[in-house]
Amino acid sequence: MAKHPLWNDDYWLLLLQLYQKKPMGVKPLYSKGIVDLSLELHIQPEYLHAQMFKLQRITPRIKRLWDKYADNPRLLSHDIKILRSMNGCGNAKDFFAGVEVKESFEKDWEPLVEEPSLNPVKLIIILDLYFQLTPITMVAETPEIINLGKLIKVSPKLIAEVMGVYQYCDPYLNRQQAPDSKLISACKDIWHRYGNGNPDKLNQLAINLQEYYK
């Protein structure tokens, strides 16, 4: 994998600290730790996940890293604190003021303006469940919807509303009347990205994304 333009070798400290968290080892791709760090650094989770695997290789650089910090978590925390304080000369917001930041994957994790309890990632997970249910079971009382709501911290009623919008997006159902929902635009975007693709790939993506909420 080519070096990411935003990658800095100082970030090995951040990955090492995350790697050492129990259970020690490479964390799942969309685990909360990896995703939160990727949002902080503006580097895709896939890249950080691949970098974390390199911590298991015995190269001179990685060996020096382990030798210095493996048995000294206080020093690691101290040096990470210094590293973060240097981000934007101690004030990242002011440092990057007026600089256009090109967002890509970050947008999928940002709350929807129309409904802050949802984001595109949650809509992807809900779409996967949509393909596992029938229209008559897409109601708030369905156990699968209740369980998903508990996982992603969204009310079953709202999940059922999203599924109602997906029914409108679904060409096989041929629903002519649009539902009374402010989520139509956001749901249409997710449907265009994943609704007509391979359902097995969508299911695997949804399973991976759910790691963030566990």
Image (cartoon, rainbow, N blue to C red):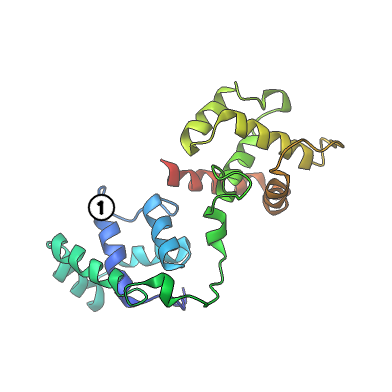
Q: Position of residue 200 (x, y in %)?
A: 62, 45
> Which of 62 and 31 lies nearest the eye of the viewer?
31
Among the 4 quarters of the image, the one containing residue 136: top right
Q: Residue furthest left?
A: 71
Q: Is residue 116 left or right of residue 53?
A: right
Q: Residue furthest right?
A: 176
Please name the residue shown 49% across and 47% down the image.
208
| 50 to 200, vertically: above or below | below
Please name the residue shown 53% across and 54% down the image.
110
Count the marks.
1
| 79 to 116, vertically: above or below | below
- Give the residue number, with chain letter if any, for mark 1: 21
Q: Secondary structure at mark 1?
A: loop
Q: Position of residue 170 (x, y in %)?
A: 78, 40
Q: Position of residue 103 (x, y in %)?
A: 56, 67
Q: Is residue 5 visible?
A: yes
Please name the residue shown 33% across and 67% down the image.
54
Among the 4 quarters of the image, the one containing residue 71: bottom left
Q: Is residue 98 left or right of residue 194?
A: left
Q: Position of residue 97 (x, y in %)?
A: 48, 75
> Which of 58 and 90 lies nearest the eye of the viewer?
90
Please name the residue shown 55% across and 61% down the image.
105
Which quadrant of the figure contains the C terminus?
A: top left
User: Label 1 neighbourhood size at 10 Å, few (<14), some (14-19), many (20+)?
Assistant: few
| 31 to 43, vertically: above or below | above
> Which of 138 and 98 lies nearest the eye of the viewer?
98
Q: Residue furthest top?
A: 141
Q: Is residue 59 visible?
A: no
Name the residue type under label 1.
Lys
